[in-house]
Image (cartoon, rainbow, N blue to C red):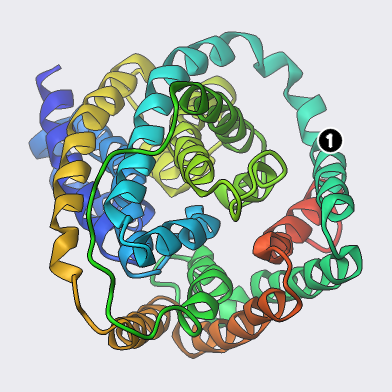
Amino acid sequence: MIGIIAGTFAGVFLGIISGLFPGVHSNTLAASLLGMQTFLLPVIGVEALAATMFAALITHTFLDSIPSTFLGIPDPDTALSVLPSHMLCLEGKGQEAVRIAALGSAFAVILSIPLSVLLFFILPPLQPYFDWWMGIVLIAVIGYLVVECESPGWAVIIFGISGLLGMFTFRYAFLGWHTLGESGVLMPLLTGMFGISVLLFSSRGPVPEQRFSGIGMTWSEIGKGTVIGTIAGTIVGWLPGLSNATANAVLCSKTDYRRDRRAYIFSTSAANTANAIIGLAALFAIGRERNGVMVAISSIGAPSMASLLVSGALAACLAYPVTIWLSGYADRLNGIDGKVLNYTAIGLIILISFFIAGPFGLFILALAAIVGLIPGMVNISRVFCMGAIMVPVILYSFGIGGF
């Protein structure tokens, strides 16, 4: 247990770093630690190293709301949440957006830990059925979103174009640098559509004064967001081929991120954290590795699921107040020229994309930014840009095209 606790504190520290620096994911940290296992294992042991990896993952899900809110640079897992978060920041309510996101993650931890134990026992025999039905479920979801859209024709076009871009990106991901592995192309793909396309036309004047006057959500909204977000995170954490980016798209069918921004931020943050915890249950129950952290934990010979759940709970207890504390520095942005801040963020996105995926990453970033501009021109939701993720996942579920 001493190793678990020590590893948790180390993981929280690393998760803070990855959460605050766009483009640095907990998967990256896990891969780095895995590469140093020859030196680390004899010193700290398997339990501490596994706890470090998992605690960093949980902490990252809390802290990643800060750059998406104040810089408009999304993490690939929560790309859609940058839109309502950044808009609240432009209204001077950035600190509220971060606090809502942290609260969503905290409530998801409370609900998803016992849920992960329940799934561990009851779902493994049903797994073959889930694998087969996944594509059909996604088709039904996107069909519902299109029907509910105010312009179904444009919705289908944007979904199709982004889907083709996603297929191209994943098919030729080997052309990029593998700083984070081939999955590193997700960063320029999603950041181009949901980051740069927003920053190019967001506020050009001074950043509004940032003030916190409370969280504008009722307890019933918090309860609803916790359940919806945790269910979405559970689905993508357990089923193969899905990611939180898909969960964001599904959540839009229940929570409109343009009309009910706070509820959407809360739900997507809850889904992000729940996905991490349920992914751990999937590893121990059915041997499926849902993210890079689970791959790394499996590679070193993971300790018990119970010990890692304890590590995740402790990490959440530490990450929540740290996130709130750091959001308190939002007033430092008061009066900064929004145009300068936006262009600085765009420059940072370009540098990170080049570092992660090289020239191919910049090519994908440019194409994604162009696609991301279309919804604004025709005045429909950017959720249909999630075709970049959903189309390859649907094809994967049917065994088509090698996805």
From what the image shows, is residue 289 above or below residue 191? above
The quadrant in which the N terminus is found is top left
> How many numbered circles does the render carry?
1
The answer to which image quadrant residue 106 occupies is top left
Q: Position of residue 368 (x, y in %)?
A: 61, 79
Give SS at disc 1.
helix
Q: Position of residue 117 (x, y in %)?
A: 48, 12
Which amino acid, by three-letter code, is at mark 1? Trp
| Res 403 seen here | no
Q: Nearer the viewer, residue 310 or 208?
A: 208
The answer to which image quadrant residue 18 occupies is bottom left
Q: Nearer the viewer, residue 371 or 122?
A: 371
Q: Position of residue 147 (x, y in %)?
A: 89, 51
Q: Position of residue 144 (x, y in %)?
A: 85, 46
Residue 267 placement, left or right of 166: left
At a point 17% along the width and 39% down the height, the residue shown is: 41
Dot 1 corresponds to which residue? 132
At a point 33% along the width and 84% down the height, the residue shown is: 205
At a point 68% along the width and 59% down the height, the residue shown is: 383
From what the image shows, is residue 95 above or below residue 43? below
From what the image shows, is residue 83 above or below residue 42? below
Q: Nearer the viewer, residue 79 or 134?
A: 79
Residue 129 placement, left or right of 318: right
Q: Nearer the viewer, residue 356 or 286?
A: 356
The quadrant in which the C terminus is found is bottom right
